[in-house]
Amino acid sequence: MSTRETGSPWRNWAGNVTSRPAREVRPATAEELADAVRTAAEDGLRVKTVGTGHSFTSIAATDGVLIRPDLLTGIRRIDREAMTVTVESGTPLKRVNVALAREGLSLTNMGDIMEQTVAGATSTGTHGTGRDSASIAAQIRELELVTADGGLLVCSEKENPEVFAAARIGLGALGIVTAITFAVEPVFLLTAREEPMTFDRVTSEFDELHAENEHFEFYWFPHTDNCNTKRNNRSAGPAAPPGRIGAWVEDELLSNGLFQLACSVGRAVPPAIPSIAKVSSRALSARTYTDIPYKVFTSPRRVRFLEMEYALPREAAIGALRELKAMVERSPLKVSFPVEVRTAPADDIALSTASGRETAYIAVHLYKGTPHRAYFTAVERIMTAHGGRPHWGKVHTRDAAYFSEVYPRFAEFTELRDRLDPDRLFANDYLRRVLGA
């Protein structure tokens, strides 16, 4: 285990959160991590863990001990009889996906970015889109975590089930995750169908598109009536991945290179954004391809941005999106990033954004360095009017009073926190705001 005193700042991926931890620790085992927790408590320091910093909130910020889990990586075991994989908490999702594919296995569903660590992604509720398959955390079968007393606690549906019910999306408030066991299945093929569609068509047909596809999502380009849709469904094959040149044009040149340039121009000259949006929204053409899951679900994201995302009851999403579009059209706002819409089935995790209800997600983004307060405030006003639940790792202004109203099991979570971390060893300003003191 490496430990160093530090006064140097830590910054998240987007650059909007900075903190100055007193100490950084890199444990190589769960036992070393437990030692670091006990030492921090003795020294009167709070403890937080940070993965790749892909959260836009200050959920990982601390002025105490910052745990970096980059030595807690790798696959512990694959159980083909139980169809599970157990991985160390600091393992990036990308490494998990590649390793599983090599073994002929796959997660059932995943988000579109795979740079995050497994613990960071699950603790904040990272998700993709799915009619029947839910977030990454909903695929967890067992968790191992170090608690505030330095003990190692294992939880599952059978062992410490009350902890398992909450800790799959634990926000770093219940303990530090050291290993996760996921359900897996034999690797399968997905056929992706990407197609431009008008805003009026995709919103009027949203329920049918959701019902007819295993994974449906779409992007609306503000200042236009243009959307891009993506339908992913299981396929008998054969595999037909996009050609190397075509994939580079779509995923690197258009979605990253030229988009980066367009965002830079838009930030410098905001009045140009509507014209740029009309051109860029027509640049992506229809295409169909078939490949293994992580190569279909995920894509490179090299353009840095800030993001707000709200989970709404699925039946409320299209009405809220139409309100958002009308708000942008009547305002002086200039929005360079598309608005993303995804779905998830109801799950049984206490603080999951899909807990207990069929859900649709509306995510808004702005290019890094662009003033975001006016846009995000206006969006948040619309989303909260529909009982929206913000993503725990994305920009929002909600507090514990609000969450106690929109999460029926909020008190269940906070009572468990009182039991596992009564002295708030794992607290920080963000957790005090969203969970209460």
Image (cartoon, grey):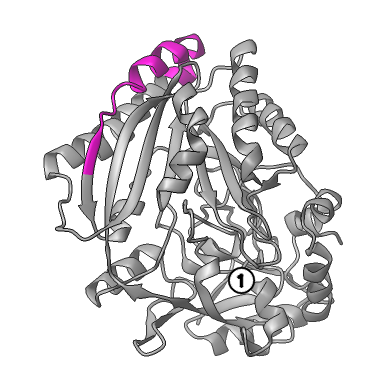
Residue 317 appears left or right of 424: left
Q: Residue at x 61, y 64 (%)?
A: 347
For mark 1, give the secondary structure: loop
Q: Is residue 242 above or below residue 421?
A: above
State the predominant SS element of the stretch in magenta.
helix
The image shows residue 111 at horizontal and vertical percentages of 44, 54
The image shows residue 367 at horizontal and vertical percentages of 49, 31
> Quick check: is 285 in the magenta stretch?
yes
Q: Which residues are magenta?
A: 266-288
The image shows residue 271 at horizontal and vertical percentages of 50, 9
Give the residue type that dot 1 points to.
Arg
The image shows residue 62 at horizontal and vertical percentages of 68, 60
Q: Residue at x 77, y 69 (%)?
A: 413
Return the residue at label 1: 168
The quadrant in which residue 410 appears is bottom right
How many circles with numbers are drawn on the protein? 1
> Quick one: 390 or 273, which is closer to the camera?
390
The quadrant in which residue 256 appears is top left
